[in-house]
Image (tube, rainbow, N blue to C red):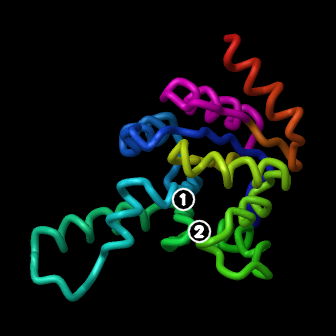
Amino acid sequence: MPLNAAAAYGMYSQEVTLSDVINTLNQAGFDNEDICMMLSPTHPIAAVVRDASIFTSDTGSNAATAGVIGWLSKFGAVLIPTVGFFIRSQAFFHALMVARDTPAICGNTRVLAGLGFSDDQADRFESQLRQVGVLIYVSCQAREKTEWAYEVLRQTGASEAAMLQDRPISMRETLAVTATAAAA
């Protein structure tokens, strides 16, 4: 199953409640399997994943950690550079393996190229992600669905939201879409 050529993405701060954004996407008709997230290594969820251990005796902590990891495992893919990744969707697996020549998938945001982002965008996200917090990517079957995903991401507080259509788009095109969204 190939990854859909159309997609929308949104950038969020670390303070956003991800479960609220995901619930809104789900209520709008988007399945978890169509969602890919990239979290900053400094995001609180990244700390939970990083600190996960089967060797702790604190059952409350283990249950909370298992709950977070179980939640992350429901998505098409979740990437946390330098920490780890979860890939459930075969389509996301193949798309993200474009970067298999890189040293490590969880330490390199170049994997975004497989999702349709240009090299310029991947570089920009690499630097922004450390300050911003979360990138949510929604793979869509049709343009109308992509426009709907874009609107949902924008309405849920994305600091930047844009659509990717059938090909990697240039930085100029991304900025034009972002500027249009900011003006609306």
Q: Which residue is mark 1?
A: 33
- For image coordinates 70% across by 30% down, the residue present is 147
Q: Is residue 144 magenta?
A: yes
The three-letter code of the residue at mark 2 reads Ser
Q: Closer to the camera, 19 or 48? A: 48
Highlighted range, magenta: 141-162
Q: Is residue 23 above or below residue 32?
A: above
Q: Residue at x 59, y 40 (%)?
A: 11
Neighbour tally class for label 2: few under 14, some 14-19, many 20 plus, Cα within 10 Å: many
Q: Where residue 102 sits: x, y (%)?
A: 75, 78
The single residue placed furthest to the bottom in the displayed view is: 55
Residue 24 falls in which quadrant of the image?
Answer: top left
Instruction: Check the image and report above or below for 76 versus 176.
Output: below
The quarter in which the C terminus is drawn is top right
Q: Please name the amino acid that badge 1 sits on.
A: Glu
Determine whether 162 is above or below 130 in the image: above
Q: Position of residue 160 (x, y in %)?
A: 64, 32
Residue 61 appears in which quarter of the rendering? bottom left
Mark pair 1, 2: CA separation = 6 Å
Q: Secondary structure at mark 2?
A: loop
138 lies left or right of 23? right
Rendered image: mark on residue 22: none
Query: How many labels, in total?
Result: 2
Residue with the most extreme top position: 184
Q: Quadrant of the N terminus?
A: bottom right
Q: Which residue position is annotated with label 2?
A: 89
Left or right of 74? Residue 98 is: right
